[in-house]
Image: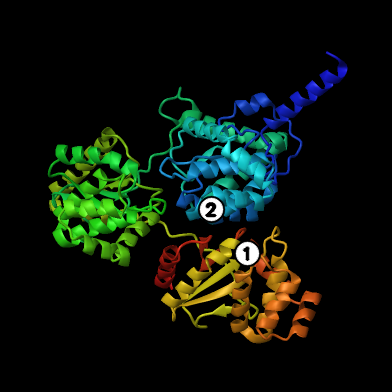
Amino acid sequence: MNKGTAVVGFLLSFLAGVGLMWGVARGSNTTLEATTTSVTEVESSPVPIASDDPAWGNADAPVTIVEVSDFECPFCSRVIPTVNRIKSEYGREKVRIVWKNYPSPNHPSARPAAEAAATVHALGGDFWRFNELAFSSQQQLTPENFGKWAAVSGVDASRFTADFNAKKYAAKIDRDLAVSRRLGINGTPYFLVNGKPLSGAQPFEKFKGLIDEQLAASQELANAGVSPARISFQLTKQNFAQKAAAAPSAGQQAAAQPRPEDTTVWKVPVSDEDPTRGSAGALVTIVAFSDFQCPFCARVEATLTQILDDYAGDVRIVWKDNPTSFHKRARPAAALARVAFAEKGNDGFWAAHAALFDSQKNLEDAGLEEVAKKVGLSWSKVETAIERDTFAAVIDRGVDLASDFNVPGPPHFFVNGRRIAGARPYEEFKKLIDAQLVIAKDLVRKGVARDRVYRELMKTAQTPPLPERRDVPAPTKNNPSKGPPDARVVIQEFSDFQCPFCSRVTPTVAQILEAYPKDVKVVWRHMPLSFHQDAPLAAEAAQEAFAQAGSLAFWKYHDKLFANQKALGRADLEKYAAELGLDLGRFKAALDSRAHKAVVDADIEVAKRAGVVSTPAFTINGYPVVGAQPFQQFDKVIKLALKKN
């Protein structure tokens, strides 16, 4: 071996070692500082961080937050504003965020999305931009969109397509899943703050408490002479060691600790609109959130039947519709079952329920027609109910309730308010049912009637947490708006004229104003993104339309820009101004002098302080809604805002 080969070999080995260190994150906007953390130390960490893990923040930040997430999980989407606020308030010097994939088998598009994101990262693209685009459009996680988002994220489209189709980085997802299994993680979103667990879409205050605690601990280590590059690593090991010492089994490895059981008794309402199976005097009520097209929902049916047989008279099942958006035939199937319930009561519903699960692979109209005939329903009535969405209100109430109680996907159960997620085996249900029977029988001995046990338990049960409100300043005279000036609900829309998802949500905004003509006002906030080169000047042009002729002119110009997103150059902007009859000389002068740049920059600063980093984003009386969400999601938050007003 000559000296040149030896030098090259040494350099390659050195670079490989650096790639395994605690702080590497290629293509992720991470500042990689010098580090003395050894490869051995990193490999022995209870929360391993690999060279191909996307990361945001400095490598020697004293707090490392490992985010375990799923691109199709609605609760992972819900926590994004909180994560963005963490980035904004603590900065790269204090906090580093590391991404690990956990695509749920219940989410068929989650695994392809994870592989696409891993491909973008591996090819040197902006992983976090791809991340934002995917979460802001969870209903459109398709290969076609992956390619578009990859290009926006700075990756060559043909290279991305070739590597994605070849599943070149699929093994990365498998490694992430293996780490999650070893850590006992079984749901998303899940966070480890220097190794300390935080499960679910928790509010900012929960994260802040842990982060501040770890920052204080990091200062102690720094005062003791520990180098910055080793502080987060050391704290993670300490936190896991403390957890292991407190565990009942002292010999158990800290890394194998299971996810904490949710012991909360949740206040899950039941009503006459819910189909039930079992005795009205049952001591244990199992509320099931389910989906007729979900294979895991079908799989658990045998377990539920066995429970009803084994606990006859003591257990009842209550059905809640939770058709997921990616099961396109789940909602029509739910409508058929609702027709059966309306016409034939509980017996009719459960007959349709059984027939639908038996025909799960054929839920197109022809298959539903066969089910209708089988259970004695008029197909014309069922077809009308599907076309008119007759049962939209009751089905949506089930979906909304699932969202309120952090239900990641069907099947999901609450046993006298205690949570069981997924198609779990009979033994897990039995253990919880037996424990609840002891509690229920004690209530009966104290004089509570059997048919009132569930109501009694719900009196002290926990209501779902409210979404975290943002402190967003009131709009100023510079902000265009539409809707009544004294509206009880103010929606502030942070948007970008070159963003395709901002354009996509425009009809939904119109639907909101139509549904709430007296109660809702929509206020525009400019947020042109840095990688949309035409967006800043387009924002200033729209603001000039507002300056010349008020909100009406602004919204007309707004519509022009969204209708012509591929033509937003200077000449195009002037053309649209002329078409709307604006003073073209004044318009050109405003663009030349950047007269409205300060207004646009002020909106961007408002977004930054509110933790908004992607578009479209909305605050509804301070409650955040991220991305081009459907009307139903906005409607739910608007109703909450009206109630709290």
Numbered circle sitting on residue 607: 1
At label 2, counting other C-alpha atoms closer than 10 Å, the crowd grade (few under 14, some 14-19, many 20 or more) is many
Q: Amino acid at mark 2?
A: Phe
Which residue sits at x=67%, y=51%? 91
At label 1, counting other C-alpha atoms closer than 10 Å, the crowd grade (few under 14, some 14-19, many 20 or more) is many
Where is residue 96 drawn, in percent x and y? 64, 44
Question: Considering depth in this image, is 287 or 70 the residue closer to the camera?
Answer: 70
Which residue sits at x=54%, y=47%? 143
Disc 2 vs disc 1: which is toward the camera? 2
Relative to 478, 643 lies left or right: left
Where is residue 122 drawn, in percent x and y? 65, 39
**Contact? badges 2 and 1 (CB < 8 Å):** no
Q: Is residue 496 visible?
A: yes
Where is residue 99 drawn, in percent x and y? 58, 42
Q: Is residue 276 visible?
A: no
Q: Earlier in the sequence, mark 2 or mark 1?
A: 2
Quarter of the rendering occupied by the C terminus: bottom left
Q: Secondary structure at mark 1?
A: helix
Q: Is residue 290 above or below residue 550?
A: above
Numbered circle sitting on residue 135: 2
Which quadrant of the view contains residue 7?
A: top right
Relative to 565, 391 lies left or right: left
The answer for how far apart the CA atoms under marks 2 and 1 are is 18 Å
Q: Name the residue furthest top.
A: 1
Where is residue 257 drawn, in percent x and y? 46, 31
Numbered circle sitting on residue 211: none
Q: Amino acid at mark 1?
A: Ala
Q: Is residue 285 above or below residue 633?
A: above
Q: Is residue 422 above or below residue 252?
A: below
Q: Secondary structure at mark 2?
A: helix
Which residue sits at x=22%, y=44%? 439
